[in-house]
Image (spheres, rainbow, N blue to C red):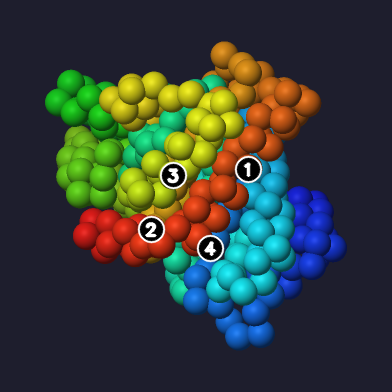
């Protein structure tokens, strides 16, 4: 996590060579900010294009973030060309390099240091195996539950022990039973990260790690409260003590700005992309992204675009699909649609106001 040293170097070198003012290691070691404008004074409008470039252990670019960086650069080059052609346009372009999306909450850490202050709108795209303008981005938080009991010889004096593994198993089962009362849109998925060392010692420590998801922050809180009851039940049943830690980098749901989104839709359709009806669009998949947190701070979109693959994200097959000539070409189209979107917002009278009106209405 946050180990994107090579990608950080390649992307920042490229942007610098293209004439951007680059701030390497902006807030985080592998984050960056690159800006471009031609006016002598700071322009009024600040459009942000986002690059992700982190990978996953085992499946490498199984989420295709290499392509997100490519699309971001393509959009940046396109927007920069327009700024050069129209030097009077009061537009500042910011390319934000945001590392550690897969669990590291790079954007959340950058937001906490006001990285997106002054930005008027932010655009990124994400490869998938479907096209969506309004992807179903769930609020997400992590919970780590540690049970502490008492060790004992498991054959000679088991009654002297307090079994932390039993506490964890109990809690895991309780969560699984509670699933019957989950809303269909709720998710709780967990693993045992510690469950004792030797079978002949009553385990005095066990740890569960859960990821919890719901359609919005309020429902996520509701779900986490319910689960807390399950986790405490494991401790009560066994006599263990329990410590429940929530992640300090919760991922928010995505408040897709519909004005930006519909402009992107039109631009990408002109370039040949197609979309299903809006209900299907929203229901194709569910995942979480720290772009959700950005969408609470500035008007944002996070459309997905399909690579020519039936494989799903976070797989070896998707990693292979993320590095084909065809996928690079599809990504270029998404990048052009991003650039056209930013340019439309800036050049069409009143659109930026509409974008902001919707943003503040939903805030
Ligand atoms: Zn991913
Ligand atoms: Zn991803």
Residue 106 is situated, as x and y percent measured from the top left of the image, at 54, 57
Q: Is residue 218 above or below residue 248?
A: above
> Circle 4 is placed at which residue position?
47
Q: Earlier in the sequence, mark 4 or mark 3?
A: 4
Q: Residues within 10 Å of mark 3 (few under 14, many from 20)?
A: some
Q: Can you name the residue that lies furthest to the bottom here?
A: 41
Q: Quadrant of residue 328?
A: top right
- List x then y, in percent, for residue 259: 36, 49
Q: Which residue is mark 3?
A: 263
Q: Camera-side residue: 55 or 51? A: 51
Left or right of 150 in this view: 4? right
Residue at (59%, 50%) from the top-left corner? Answer: 339
Q: CA distance from mark 1 to mark 3?
A: 13 Å
- Residue under circle 1? 336
Query: Disc 4 to disc 2, how far (Cα)?
Result: 13 Å
Along the line of sight, which residue is nearer the eye, 346 or 122?
346
């Amino acid at each position: 996590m946050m180990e994107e040293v090579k990608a950080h170097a390649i992307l920042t070198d490229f942007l610098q060579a293209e004439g951007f003012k680059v701030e390497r290691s902006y807030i985080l070691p592998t984050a960056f900010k690159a800006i471009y404008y031609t006016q002598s004074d700071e322009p009024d409008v600040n459009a942000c294009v986002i690059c992700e470039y982190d990978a996953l252990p085992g499946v490498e670019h199984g989420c295709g973030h290499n392509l997100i960086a490519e699309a971001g650069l393509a959009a940046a080059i396109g927007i920069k060309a327009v700024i050069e052609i129209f030097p009077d346009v009061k537009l500042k372009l910011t390319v934000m390099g945001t590392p550690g999306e897969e669990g590291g909450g790079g954007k959340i850490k950058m937001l906490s240091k006001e990285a997106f202050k002054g930005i008027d709108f932010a655009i990124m795209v994400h490869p998938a195996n479907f096209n969506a303008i309004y992807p179903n981005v769930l609020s997400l938080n992590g919970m780590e539950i540690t049970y502490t009991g008492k060790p004992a010889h498991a054959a000679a004096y088991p009654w002297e022990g307090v079994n932390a593994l039993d506490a964890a198993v109990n809690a895991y089962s309780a969560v699984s039973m509670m699933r019957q009362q989950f809303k269909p849109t709720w998710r709780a998925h967990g693993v045992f990260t510690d469950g004792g060392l030797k079978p002949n010692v009553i385990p005095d420590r066990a740890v569960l790690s859960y990821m919890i998801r719901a359609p919005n922050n309020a429902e996520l809180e509701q779900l986490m409260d319910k689960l807390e009851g399950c986790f405490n039940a494991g401790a009560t049943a066994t006599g263990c003590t329990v410590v429940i830690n929530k992640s300090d980098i919760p991922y928010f749901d995505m408040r897709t700005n519909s004005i930006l989104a519909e402009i992107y839709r039109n631009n990408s359709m002109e370039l040949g992309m197609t979309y299903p009806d809006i209900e299907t669009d929203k229901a194709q998949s569910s995942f979480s992204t720290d772009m959700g947190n950005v969408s609470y701070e500035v008007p944002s979109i996070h459309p997905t675009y399909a690579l020519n693959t039936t494989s799903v994200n976070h797989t070896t097959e998707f990693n292979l699909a993320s590095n084909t000539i065809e996928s690079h070409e599809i990504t270029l189209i998404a990048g052009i649609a991003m650039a056209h979107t930013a340019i439309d917002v800036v050049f069409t009278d009143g659109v930026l106001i509409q974008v902001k009106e919707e943003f503040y209405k939903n805030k």
